[in-house]
Amino acid sequence: MICESWKTQLDTYLDGELSEAEMRSVDRHVRSCHSCSMDTVTRVQMKRTIQLAGRRFTPSTQFRKRVRLSIAPKPRRNLGRVWMFAAAAFILVVGVLTSTYVGTRRDGGQVFSEIADLHVATLAGSSPVDVISTDRHTVKPWFQGKIPFAFNLPELQNSDFSLLGGRMTYLEQTPGAHLIYDVRQHHISVFVFQERSLPAKLDENLLSQKKLPFNMETWSQGGLRYFVIGDASAADIASLAQLFKAAS
């Protein structure tokens, strides 16, 4: 029962709602405790399942038609009623547009949370990579035919980074590449997806507003979207991101 106090913090840990010191403390425990590590993976998978289920409903054509008919002004009504229905329709349209805009911003921010979930779930698993190699000339060809795009890996000579390997990953239904690097005993994930295939248009300014348990950099280059994320320092994350930018 020694882990019960830790397990009560897992949800707030995954949502990035703990203080910086608490985040580091829980992160160290999760990495060293098999029980909490597996519990973390289960919670991440449950979060993603709930998120996907919440996006499955799309109003049908018949439903939209019923809504339009219900708010349409009836013939031979007095002018006051016509204006009342017009005002109601205007408020409804404004509400829909506002909800759509807010939903788009929320979905864009949600992508960052899902990337963090993928990072945690992969590192907590027993086999974080499918191709194990420190040679970029071995890892890069492994992805050919598995994902619908090509990308370059940086040369790491004279750097503090080492490549552990890679695996295929999915952001919802979008296939991508997941590379794992080490720097000073810290694991860093690099995700690469086709920009046009992502489930939401990303506003990189949202990243600074999103409180995540990890440092992250993201950018678009050559039609691809890159994410570099890990518990390494912001300087290390930026350095690895710069190597990828130069290689691309």
Image (tube, rainbow, N blue to C red):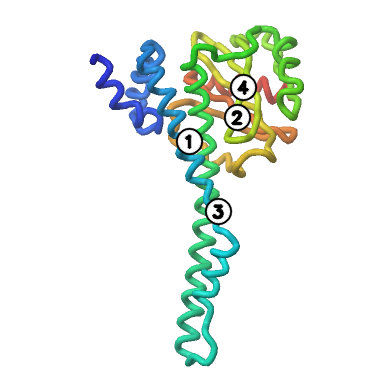
Name the amino acid type tagged 2: Tyr
Label 1 vs 3, first from the N-terminus:
1
* Residue position marked by numbered label 4 in the rendering: 178
Q: Which residue is mark 2?
A: 170
Nearer-the-camera pick, 60 or 181: 60
Q: Position of residue 120 (x, y in %)?
A: 47, 22
Which corner quadrant holds the C terminus?
A: top right
- Residue lying farthest left? 1
Q: CA distance from mark 4 to mark 1?
A: 20 Å
How far is mark 1 from mark 3, CA to CA? 17 Å
Mark positioned earlier in the residue sequence (2 or 3)? 3
Give the residue type that dot 4 points to. His
Instruction: Kindly state the secondary structure of the residue where label 4 is placed.
Output: strand
How packed is label 2: few (under 14 Cα within 10 Å), some, or many (20 or more)?
A: some
- The residue that disc 3 covers is 58
Q: Secondary structure at mark 1?
A: helix
Sequence-first tag of 2 and 1: 1
The residue drawn where x is 51% and y is 33% is: 114
| Few, some or many residues within 10 Å of mark 4 (<14, 14–19, 20+) | many
Q: Nearer the viewer, mark 4 or mark 1?
A: 1
In the rendered structure, find residue 211 and report the number of the disc placed on it.
none
- Counting residues from the N terminus, which is met first, the one under dot 4 or under dot 3? 3
- Among the two numbered marks 2 and 4 on one chain, the one whose residue lies closer to the N terminus: 2
* Tag of residue 49: 1
In the foreground, 62 or 40: 62
Q: Nearer the viewer, mark 2 or mark 4?
A: 2
Q: Earlier in the sequence, mark 4 or mark 1?
A: 1
Indicate left or right for 27 with 225 as reference: left
- Where is residue 190? Give x, y as percent: 60, 22
Q: Residue at x 62, y 18 (%)?
A: 167
Mark 2 to mark 1: distance in Å? 13 Å
Secondary structure category for the residue under label 3: loop
